[in-house]
Amino acid sequence: MTVLAAAPLRYSERVAAAVPVVLAPMAGITNTAFRRLCREQMGDTPGLFVSEMITTRALVERNPKTLQLIEFRPDESPRSMQLYGVDPAVVGAAVRMIVDEDLADHVDLNFGCPVPKVTRKGGGAALPWRIGLFDDIVRAAVREARGLPVTVKMRVGIDAEHHTFREAGLRAQDAGVRHVALHGRTALEYYGGHADWDRIAELVELLDIPVLGNGDVWEADDAVRMVAETGCAGVVVGRGCLGRPWLFADLAAAFAGRAERVRPGLRLVAATMRRHAGLLADWQGEQRGVTEFRKHVAWYLKGFAVGGELRRSLAMTSTLAELDDELARLDLDQPFPEVVLGQPRGRTTAGRSVSLPEGWLATRDSRAVPAGAEVEGSGG
């Protein structure tokens, strides 16, 4: 199998992806430990592995938690950081800080988050509706980056009546971003239903810069199909890799035209779980790291025959020794559960409505910064 449409991504001497694959920023997930697990799966030809979403105001104010979140391992290259902000001045200051202090090699801007606490303040997927403000933010970031590659991640729009991706894509291109990644859902669709890959294809036709596709890449073959069907330059992988860092090995093989796929039995999955928890413990301290790992247990065990009591026990451990004891109780000889292939992972619900600031949809012209919009959120 040969994929002619997906060439390597290269934006600078340091920012390049031999395999056109990007790990999507996910709050509480894509920290340095998980990025390392995923990166190692691709061997010597990695893609781009982006940090959790970083709030620009917290960064410029040097919030201790935020400063920990932006930590990269010494051997992590390129260092990709996603920023969330609603004030062009603050976003510009954050990017200037990144450049001046050599904190990252690549900056991605989040305009895709559909979480209500973000959109109700006009941020995330809601912000491109105010296209002038969007333009100001992107231009401030590119200007202050001084040559550091800047990219944009966004959604189709707020809902079916309020699409924003076409004009936002054109504005981002004119501002000088290096690629636009489009999640084929609106904010209203949240994570439910099916991503609309036709919108990705439409943006590919509209823009001259690379467009990356995001949404419903559950298996490596989905990524190949997305490229073939839309003409996108590469893929952004989010929920599909939850509890499955080896998906990136499959992606590397698929884009190289190789048929082999990783199908780990429970013994290898358990070893990966233990290593993931260990990496988190090394980074955050044992108790905090193991507690942070709890959310990953259900994703790793999806499809395996593991009783409810043991699943609960695994998700309640607080030390590595406790985790070792519980992992030893698993029937480690179980083969990979083929039934889970192609199935959604993580959140799959649709939004009931999109929370927006009062009067947000009345005009697209305002460049005013929404009050109190710089809050913690999640990837889009």
Image (spheres, rainbow, N blue to C red):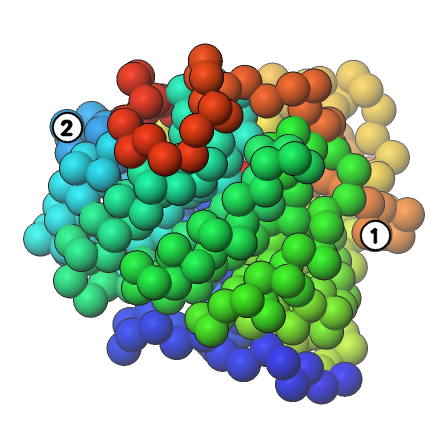
Give the residue displayed 72% in from the left and 58% down from the top: 198
Look at label 1 and name its amino acid: Leu
Q: Quadrant of the N terminus?
A: bottom right
Tag 1 residue: 341
> As displayed, is residue 194 above or below residue 175?
above
Tag 2 residue: 61
Give the residue displayed 23% in from the left and 28% down from the top: 58
Of residues 222 and 40, the one nearer the viewer is 222
Label placed on residue 276: none
Q: Evaluate if marks 1 and 2 touch, with contact meaning CB atoms under 8 Å apart.
A: no
Of residues 156 and 298, the one nearer the viewer is 156
Residue 279 location, quadrant:
top left
Which residue sits furthest top? Answer: 358
**Front: mark 1 or 2:** 2
Q: Can residue 185 be seen in this snapshot?
A: yes
Residue 68 x %, y % = 27, 35
Give the residue displayed 14% in from the left and 28% down from the top: 61
Give the residue displayed 38% in from the left and 55% down from the top: 171
Which residue sits furthest right? Answer: 339
Give the left or right position of residue 88, taking residue 151 as reference. left
Mark 1 → mark 2, Cα distance in angstroms = 44 Å
| Element marked by disc 2 | loop
